[in-house]
Image (tube, helix red, strand yellow):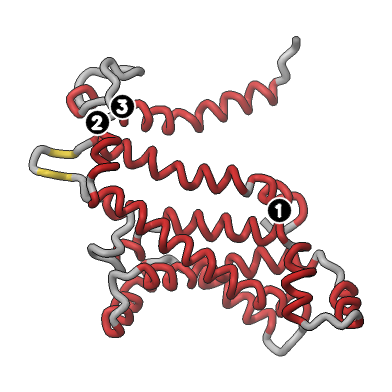
Amino acid sequence: MRLRPSAIVMTLYLLFLMVPIYWLVNMSLKTNAEITGAFSLFPRDPTLRNYAVILTDPSWYMGYVNSIIYVVMNTVISITVALPAAYAFSRYSFMGDKHLFFWLLTNRMSPPAVFALPFFQLYSSIGLFDTHIAVALAHSLFNVPLAVWILEGFMRGVPKEIDETAYIDGYSFPRFFVRIFMPLIASGIGVAAFFCFMFSWVELLLSRTLTSVNAKPIAATMTRTVSASGMDWGVLAAAGVLTIIPGALVIWFVRNYIAKGFALGRV
């Protein structure tokens, strides 16, 4: 069988992308002494101690719980707000609509460091500091514009005649939107939810600035692994492996929506 050059290049590229993940898994099964010792492609004495530390230490596993809580909250808030906003941009023309749409996108372009101090002062003054809702609302500033942009592209692909036909048939707007319109853009909702989840899951600056103990995410916990004995590389690698799992699961469940999004919508 003759191998095509494109297939060879793609295979090599995929192998190159898998190297960091393999090395992370490899380190997570080693002791610190072996990691800092001689170079080895495989662990000489594989151990699950690093994973046991994370799964039994509240300061570690609560980081995952906190991250999942505020990420899910942010995804729900972002999609709930973005759906009616995207519908308005896709169906109506009003004064300043293009300028308002561009302004939404500029929030996505702005670096989180610009908003870290204002959010910190605001949440500290109203008692929201170190809460899950604080991080979820802060991430909404960036994820709502992204969700609006994605959903608006999908909604423009739905003919306006469907709206008019539903109104003639006696559908109220909420009933039409939930029972007819949302199923038509289910792929867009799945894609928008995926990107909102992933951007919120990997964001570090705001989640670390706006939390201290009760809502501290795993990303912030992983930056504080230095002790008197040095860096605990094995535990840090195990935490990295466990951090990849939620994103991989989300990709697996919405993979069909993502594929349709690349083919049909604005992704």
Residue at image point 58% right, 75% down: 81
List the residue tagged with mark 3: 29
Which quarter of the figure is the C terminus placed in? bottom right
Residue at image point 74% right, 62% down: 185
Q: Earlier in the sequence, mark 1 or mark 3?
A: 3
List the residue tagged with mark 2: 49
Q: Earlier in the sequence, mark 2 or mark 1?
A: 2
State the residue lying farthest toward the top: 1
Q: Is residue 140 left or right of residue 257?
A: left
The residue nearer to you, when weighing 1 against 238, is 238
Amino acid residing under circle 3: Leu
Q: Is residue 17 left or right of residue 3?
A: left
**Relative to 2, is 98 above or below?**
below
**Relative to 60, is 105 above or below?**
below
Residue 138 x %, y % = 42, 71
Label 3 crowding class (10 Å Cα cut-off): few <14, some 14-19, many 20+? many
Amino acid residing under circle 2: Arg
**Separation of disc 2 and disc 1 at Cα?**
41 Å
Residue 261 numbered tag: 1
Residue 141 x %, y % = 48, 72
Q: Earlier in the sequence, mark 3 or mark 2?
A: 3
| Image depth: mark 3 or mark 2 in front | 2
Q: Toward which corner of the image does residue 211 lie, by quadrant?
A: bottom left
State the residue lying farthest toward the left: 228
Label 1 close to label 3 by CB (< 8 Å): no
Residue at image point 29% right, 29% down: 48
SS for callout 1:
helix
